[in-house]
């Protein structure tokens, strides 16, 4: 079975109410959605809950998916807003707002609104750049950099040498640097 693009899946979901296309979309997008939610929430359980809610909302609003021009940006905003709403809801439940204050701001609380916007745009650029990496390269990068696995552990997992892990990681970092440098050049 060939991997269909997100646009193809969205079309099939919208036009045919396809459960299988939705499942494929879920499989393709879950890790990206989780990384975005975790950035804001900093707790696995909360991030999982928000991601499931977002997928639920996508399914419930499938008839309006034809209005979405860029699903990557659309989903980023959906998850960001759902995460912020979740934090607000948790803050109302909590008797101590100091806990919410320490969780709600992934960036420095001294940042101006403009700096926070730039940080969020940079984070979105990073997420998009990671998603654009070749599949194996992306998996290796995420295991080493985000899950803090050793080169040896990743090499064993993929049945490759630690030098290949290092080469893939260098390739990923180089591509990420290119995308992030382009982001800064575009924002000047």
Image (tube, rainbow, N blue to C red):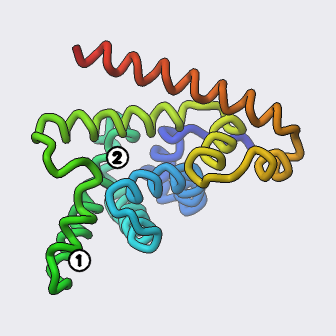
Residue count near mark 2 (Cα–Cα under 10 Å), binned few <14, some 14–19, many ≥20: some
Is residue 59 in sight in this rendering?
no
* Viewer-nearest residue: 111 or 34: 111
Quarter of the picture holding the N terminus? top right
Disc 2 vs disc 1: which is toward the camera?
1
Left or right: where 132 falls relative to 164: left
Residue count near mark 1 (Cα–Cα under 10 Å), binned few <14, some 14–19, many ≥20: some
Instruction: Give how far across and how far down residue 171 sits, in percent.
Output: 66, 24
Of the numbered discs 2 and 1, the one sitting upstream in the chain is 2
Q: Secondary structure at mark 1?
A: helix
* Viewer-nearest residue: 74 or 163: 163
Quarter of the picture holding the C terminus? top left
Q: Secondary structure at mark 2?
A: helix
Left or right: where 87 falls relative to 132: left
Disc assigned to residue 90: 1
Q: CA distance from mark 2 to mark 1?
A: 21 Å
Instruction: Give how far across and how far down residue 124 sits, in percent.
Output: 36, 38
Residue pictured at 13% horizontal, 47% vertical = 110
Vertical side of 95 occupied by 178: above or below: above
Instruction: Give how far across and how far down residue 164 sits, in percent.
Output: 81, 32
Vertical side of 107 occupied by 188: above or below: above
Residue pictured at 57% horizontal, 60% vertical = 23
* Viewer-nearest residue: 84 or 165: 165
Is residue 18 in sight in this rendering?
yes
Q: Which residue is mark 2?
A: 76
């Amino acid at each position: 079975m060939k991997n269909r693009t997100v646009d193809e899946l969205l079309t099939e979901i919208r036009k045919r109410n396809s459960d299988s296309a939705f499942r494929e979309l879920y499989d393709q997008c879950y890790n990206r959605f989780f990384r975005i939610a975790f950035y804001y929430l900093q707790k696995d359980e909360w991030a999982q809950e928000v991601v499931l809610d977002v997928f639920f909302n996508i399914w419930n609003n499938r008839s309006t998916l034809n209005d979405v021009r860029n699903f990557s940006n659309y989903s980023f905003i959906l998850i960001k807003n759902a995460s912020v709403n979740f934090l607000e809801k948790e803050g109302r439940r909590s008797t101590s707002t100091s806990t919410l204050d320490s969780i709600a701001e992934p960036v420095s609380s001294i940042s101006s609104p403009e700096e926070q916007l730039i940080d969020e745009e940079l984070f979105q650029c990073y997420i998009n750049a990671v998603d654009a990496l070749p599949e194996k390269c992306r998996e290796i990068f995420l295991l080493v950099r985000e899950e803090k696995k050793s080169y040896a552990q990743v090499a064993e997992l993929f049945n490759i040498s630690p030098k290949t892990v290092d080469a893939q990681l260098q390739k990923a970092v180089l591509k990420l640097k290119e995308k992030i440098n382009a982001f800064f050049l575009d924002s000047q």
